[in-house]
Amino acid sequence: MEVTVNQQHFIVPDNCNVQALLVDVLQHPHQGLAIAINEAIIPKTQWESCMLNAGDKIIIIKATQGG
């Protein structure tokens, strides 16, 4: 199925959750991240249980240091 991550399209397996998206598809470290799906924030404690659906719009925000 196709999902959009930060305005880029990705094909993911039908049974993909947020955790699998980060690790298997994006190969992205998951420290310091915030995830929103269709404008709803997904707490890190729900990443393994939150299943993606075709057409989902996912935003990944990475925390940075600065002043």
Image: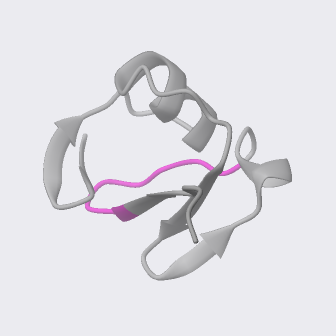
x 41%, y 55%: residue: 53
Residue farthest to the right, as pictured: 45
Q: Is residue 49 above or below residue 58?
A: above
User: Is residue 27 found left or right of 12 in the rendered image?
Assistant: right
x 36%, y 27%: residue: 26
Indicate the quadrant containing the C terminus: top left, top right, bottom left or bottom right: bottom right
Indicate the quadrant containing the N terminus: top left, top right, bottom left or bottom right: top left
x 75%, y 45%: residue: 49
User: Is residue 57 found left or right of 51 in the rendered image?
Assistant: left
- Most frequent secondary structure within the magenta stretch: loop
Q: Is residue 51 magenta?
A: yes
- Colour option used: one colour
Residue 47, percent from left and from top:
70, 46
User: Is residue 17 found left or right of 14 in the rendered image?
Assistant: right
Residue 35, percent from left and from top:
56, 60
Residue 40, percent from left and from top:
57, 80
User: Is residue 36 found left or right of 42 in the rendered image?
Assistant: left
Residue farthest to the bottom, as pictured: 39
The magenta segment is 50-58
Residue farthest to the front, as pictured: 67
Q: Is residue 37 above or below residue 53?
A: below
Q: Is residue 53 above or below residue 36?
A: above
Q: Is residue 13 above or below residue 67?
A: above
Residue 11, percent from left and from top:
21, 33
- Disc tally is 0
Q: Quadrant of residue 13?
A: top left
x 57%, y 57%: residue: 63
